[in-house]
Amino acid sequence: MTLRRAPLVLAAASAAVLSPDAALSFAPASRTTTPAVFRHAAVPGVASSAFRLSAVAGTSAADAVSSAPLTGGEDKWTWRGHEIYSEVTLPVGASASSSNPLASFFGSFGAPASEKKPIALLLHGFGASTTYWRATVSALSENGYEVHAIDLLGQGRSAKPGDVYYSTKLWAALVDDYAREVIGDRDVVLMGNSLGSVVALAATVGETDGSDADAEGHLSSGGRVKGVCLFNCGIGMNSKNIIDDPRFDSFQRVLLKATFAVFETLLFNRFVLGYALNNVVTPDLLRDALTGLYKSDPSRVDDELVMSFYGPAKDDGAPEALRQIYTNDPGPTPMSLHEKYPSVLGVSTPIHAVWGDDDAVTSLEEVVGKFYGSLAEDPERRVSLDVVSAGHIPFDDNPEDC
C-alpha cells in the first residue's frame, strides 16, 4: 500500500531493442565474511530428488557453515530429464540494520532465533543467469537468509533442450518442483526480474503447464510464499502481450500483429539466430548492449557479467530456446494473474516492486509499471513500490539504492 520514490532525478530513457534482460541485486553490507556458496547442476539420468550441495570455496566463515546440515542428498538435481543449474548460499550472520528500500519488506519476515526465516528464491530475466544476483545474494545472506538462485530451463547454465515448449507456465512448474523437492516445507520469498517476475507470480498462484496435473501446486498450497519481490516486472514471456494494451485501437493491433509476424519470419528463426549467435555475437557486442542497460553505474558491466551472457549464448540449444522465447505464446500478464487470483496477489501474499527510473525495456510509464503504481496507492492492497535511479537492472546497476 506504499508508493515511494527515491529522491533522484529522472533521466531520459534510451532505446534498447532486443537487448539482454538484466537482473537485480540488493546492496551488499560491508563484507567481513564470505557466504558459503554451493553450486549444483542436474544431469540426465539422476532422479529429481537426488541432490547434494558441494562447497566450492570459502573463508573460515564459509568453512564453519559448510558442514551444517543441508536439505537434499546426492550430488545433482534433474528436472524432467534435463540439467538444472542452481546455487545455494547459506546465511552467515544475523539481521543487521539497513537503509535498503527492501529492508522493511524483508524485515516483516524476520523470525525469533528459534524459528527459521523464509528462503529467498531468485528468478532471473531473459538471457541472464544466477550471476547477476551477486550483490543481492551477498546482502541477503549477510542478513541471515538462505538464498537459492536458479537458471531457468533453456537459459544460463541449465540445459537447452529443443523438444520442449518454452513458456511462463513451464518455468513456473520448474520453480514449484524445485521448491517441493529441494527446499521442502520451508517458506519462501520469490524474487524475479523482468520475465522472472512474471514466473514468480505464476508460481505463487500455481499457474503451471499442467504436466503434473494430478499434483497440487506446492507453493500455491499452504501459504508457503510469504512475499514476492518484482524488479522491473515484464509483461509476459515476450513482448506480444503489448498487443492487448488498451491504449491501442483495433487497427493498431493489426499492425502490431503483422510486425511481430515479419520479425518472426525474417529474424526469429533458428537458422538466422544460430548464425547470429555463432558469428555475430561477441563479448564486446554484449558489453555494449549491457552497458546501455546500466544507467547508474556502467562500470558494473565487468567481465564476469559479460561472460555470463556470452557463454550460454554459444550452447548448442541456444538458438531454438531463444527462438521459442521470442515467438511462443507470451503467456499470462501480471494484470491477468491479479485478476484471476484477486485474493492472493497483493492481498494474502504481499508484493514489493522495485523499478529503475531510466528503463527503456520495461518502463515505469508503461502498462505494467502503471498497474503496480496504482496498486501501491490502494490502501486495501499489500503492495509497495520503490523507484530508484537505475536502468533495467537496478539491483546490480545501483545496489546501494535497491
Image (spheres, rainbow, N blue to C red):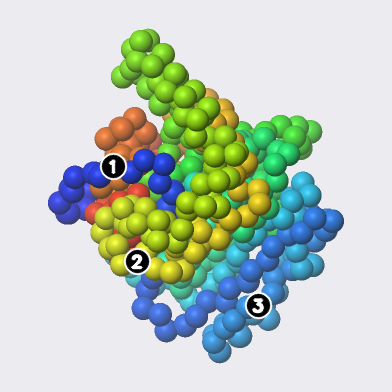
- Which residue is nearer to you in this view: 42 or 222? 42
Circle 3 Cα neighbour tier, 10 Å, few/some/many (<14 / 14–19 / ≥20): some
Q: Position of residue 214 (x, y in %)?
A: 79, 33
Picture quarter with the N terminus:
top left
Q: Secondary structure at mark 3?
A: strand
Q: Kindly identify the residue that appears in the image at 28 percent across and 42 percent down.
A: 15
- Which residue is nearer to you in this view: 269 or 36? 269
Q: Kindly identify the residue that appears in the image at 47 percent across and 24 percent down.
A: 262
Q: Earlier in the sequence, mark 2 or mark 3?
A: 3
- In the rendered structure, are the residues bearing label 1 and label 3 in contact, judged by CB atoms less than 8 Å apart? no
Q: What residue sits right under mark 2 in the picture?
A: 300
Image depth: mark 2 or mark 3 in front: 2
Q: How many tags in the picture? A: 3
Image depth: mark 2 or mark 1 in front: 1
Which residue type does callout 2 highlight? Arg
Circle 1 Cα neighbour tier, 10 Å, few/some/many (<14 / 14–19 / ≥20): few
Q: What residue sits right under mark 1 in the picture?
A: 15
Q: Earlier in the sequence, mark 1 or mark 3?
A: 1
168 is higher (above) or lower (below) than 276: above
Q: Quadrant of residue 371?
A: top left
Q: What residue sits right under mark 3 in the picture?
A: 55
